[in-house]
Image: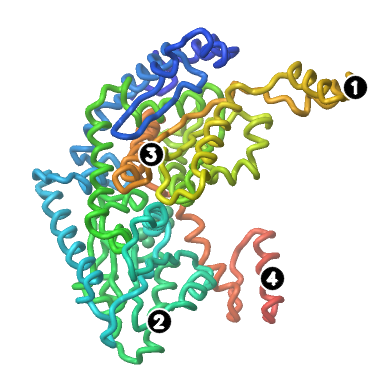
Amino acid sequence: MKPLKHLPAWKTLEQHHKAMRDFDMRAAFREDAQRFDNLSLRCGNLLLDFSKNRVTTETMQHLMQLARESDLEAMRAAMCRGERINFTEKRAVLHVALRAPVRPPLVVEGVDVEAGVAKVLGRMQHFVESIHNGSWLGHTGKPIRDVVNIGIGGSDLGPAMVCHALDHYAVENLRVHFVSNLDPAHLASTLKSLDPETTLFIVASKTFTTLETLANANSAKAWLLAALRAPAAVARHFVALSTNQPAVEAFGIDPDNMFIFWDWVGGRYSLWSAIGLSIALQIGWGNFQALLAGAHAMDVHFKEAPLEANMPVILGMLGIWYANFWGTDTYGVFPYDQRLRLLVPFLQQLDMESNGKNVNRANKLVNYNTGPIVWGAPGTNGQHAFFELVHQGTRLIPTDFLVAAVNHTPLADQHEWLLANCLAQTEALLKGKSRAVIEAELIAQGMSREEAKALAPHKVFPGNRPSNTLLYQKLDPHTLGMLIALYEHKVFVQGVIWQINSFDQWGVELGKQLAPPIRAALSSVRVIGEHDGSTLGLIADIRRRRGLST
Ligand SMILES: O=P(O)(O)OC[C@H]1O[C@H](O)[C@H](O)[C@@H](O)[C@@H]1O
């Protein structure tokens, strides 16, 4: 593998960037009436407008050349064939196999993974329908009215995001809740409004060893047993989603109530697997299938469209252009869609846990920046909070704006205003507002020339700031499936270019290892152990506050 910076396309892009330093998008739009047509792309009902970026068609050609020199197409094929591209964990990466509507056998190392997927989906469908039609009853004979998904990370963020996004499709008489945090406040406040007789807990954990999930699941079990006073009740009120059957049994959940998935499903790519059970319960089986079909449509596009007309590739390569040639550190995501309020936390795990890496596939430290810091919030809320910095701050921030043409729940002309604000923000980022125009405005408002000169610089918008706009018809299951798969593949593309393993997450381990000795040091048994001065000071202070000796 040739080091990234030695690839000819990288060198070309370095030169090209020098030539582009003073590139002004406003002039580019003035000079080229076709710019929007040339730099936008459709896939199904999704429109990606990437014309408001510091790129020319030549930039895009160089970026696609970099993708080719990085063997993107071969890596994509290796992933879809089930090769163990997650080489540090020796695992295949096959989330695309979870959402193929027709399932021709996909034999990976002698096993037909599609047959296994179909079997679990069949069991999930049966379970979902039995909850919905009331044939699955709680221990005391009452139908289930509340479902609590207990999980964290990939076993929470994906399903929680989708359930919020698709609340318009929620079935009647069933509410789905999500508990993730170790902080007992999360479970306690959720249980407050629930009736143990009509509540079902889904314990979602790929490994079934995660501290937060097991702690919350144990507390939930204690709550249930305290109310129903019969160990047999667990079988009617607890199901598990996991790859680890022995641990599920050890917890006391009947294997008949377990829905499995496989080590080739990464946690942050797992909402399409059994981990999606809460989604299917919330929106019904048909809608869950539509979600999968949407993701599959994007998979097909990603596999078949030429790189130049490939949405995940374009989004991914634009990210490379900014992170590696313009030196941007962050990347803002602004869904003008309240139902997508959990998209940013979901993307934070998807992107930052996948590409927050500093060692490449040749086991060497990289000498360029990898995954960006992902942040953002729904519009229009963000406009009233942090958009000041996006417009006038000193940093260049590439951004994605997402918006639906049609709202599920229109009220007066609110959706028209939402759309207008979304477009106005990207227009303002592009156009900016010059000092001369502002001075003239202030003088016209009656301000003296001197005052106007002093105030004007504060009101200047530099403009020429980039944004992508993703426009869709409405937030339905199929569209959401497409959007999520789009981001999954974008992250894959960038990982390939950066020559890193996007599918492990060793960086989350150290903190987990250090917690147990600190936990012991905080308890009444005084085993303080070896810690740095700061940690020792904090331990001592906590012990004092909790009435223990220091
Ligand atoms: O599903 P689980 O095995 O409980 O894991 C839950 C989460 O915790 C881990 O620390 C990982 O960083 C995540 O990738 C994972 O999604």
Figure quadrant of the C terminus: bottom right
Mark 3: amino acid: Tyr
Marks 2 & 1, CB-CB < 8 Å contact: no
Q: Residue under circle 4?
A: 540
Task: Tell me which numbered mark, 3 or 4, is placed earlier along the sequence.
Answer: 3
Packing grade of label 1 (10 A; few <14, some 14-19, many >=20) is: few
Residue 160 place in picture, x, y as percent: 40, 57
Which of the two labelled residues, at mark 2 and mark 1, occupies the earlier sequence position? 2
Frontmost residue, 67 versus 57: 57
**Amino acid type, residue under disc 1 in the picture:** Ser
Residue drawn 35% across the image and 28% down it: 313
Q: Secondary structure at mark 1?
A: loop
Q: Quadrant of residue 471?
A: top left
Whole-angstrom CA distance, mark 3 to mark 4, is 45 Å
Looking at marks 2 and 4 on the same chain, the residue that comes earlier in the sequence is marked by 2
Q: Nearer the viewer, mark 2 or mark 1?
A: 1
Indicate which label's residue lies in the foreground, 2 or 4.
Answer: 2
Q: Earlier in the sequence, mark 3 or mark 2?
A: 2
Name the mark nearer the viewer: 3 or 2.
Answer: 2
Q: Say which residue label 2 marks.
A: 195
Q: Nearer the viewer, residue 405 or 112?
A: 405
- Is disc 2 surrounded by few (<14), some (14 to 19) or many (20+) residues within 10 Å? some
Q: Which residue is mark 3?
A: 487
Kind of residue at badge 2: Asp
SS class, disc 4: helix
